[in-house]
Amino acid sequence: MKFIPNFGEFYQKPLVPIGENDRILALEKLPNRELHDGFTHWLIALEGTEVSQNCNFYQWRVLVYPAKTSGQFECLHPYFVSAFFPTMDDALTFTKEIEKRASEDQITKIPQAAS
């Protein structure tokens, strides 16, 4: 999956270490694997986009990127992108599930959203 995130409404959470199981299963599936060498953490973020132009109502999705301890990440190749949530609160609740799975070395068990 390749796209440019909306960094105007991009909010990241603290990094979560990548467990060994996830490192083997997830990082092997990413395109340009050489770009992800040395990535040791997951960066979990919320991204908001307007529902329609100039309406000031946003929908939110959760993105997960492999990252380095410094916070550097490859923004064009997220590991996971959720479906859109109608509210930021709904998306934040989902980030808690993602963080829990990541801390249990189970992020690869999260079903991928259709793109």
Image: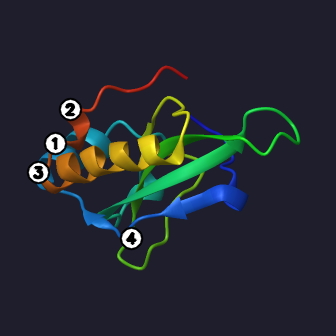
Q: Quadrant of residue 79?
A: top left
Residue ranking furthest to the right: 54
What residue is disc 3 on? 104
Query: Label 1 vs label 3: CA separation?
Result: 5 Å
Indicate the position of residue 63 as horizontal and vertical percent values.
47, 46
**In the rendered image, which residue does mark 4 sit on?**
68
- The disc at residue 109 is 2
Q: Residues within 10 Å of mark 1 (few under 14, many from 20)?
A: some
- Whichever of labels 4 and 1 marks the residue nearer the N terminus, that label is 4
Residue at horizontal 27 percent and vertical 64 percent from the top: 16
Q: Nearer the viewer, mark 2 or mark 4?
A: 2
Do callouts 2 and 1 mark residues in contact (Cβ within 8 Å)? yes
- Contact (CB < 8 A) between labels 2 and 4? no
Find numbered disc 2 in the image and state the secondary structure of the residue it sits on: helix
Give the mark count.
Answer: 4
User: Which residue is denoted by mark 1 in the rendering?
Assistant: 106
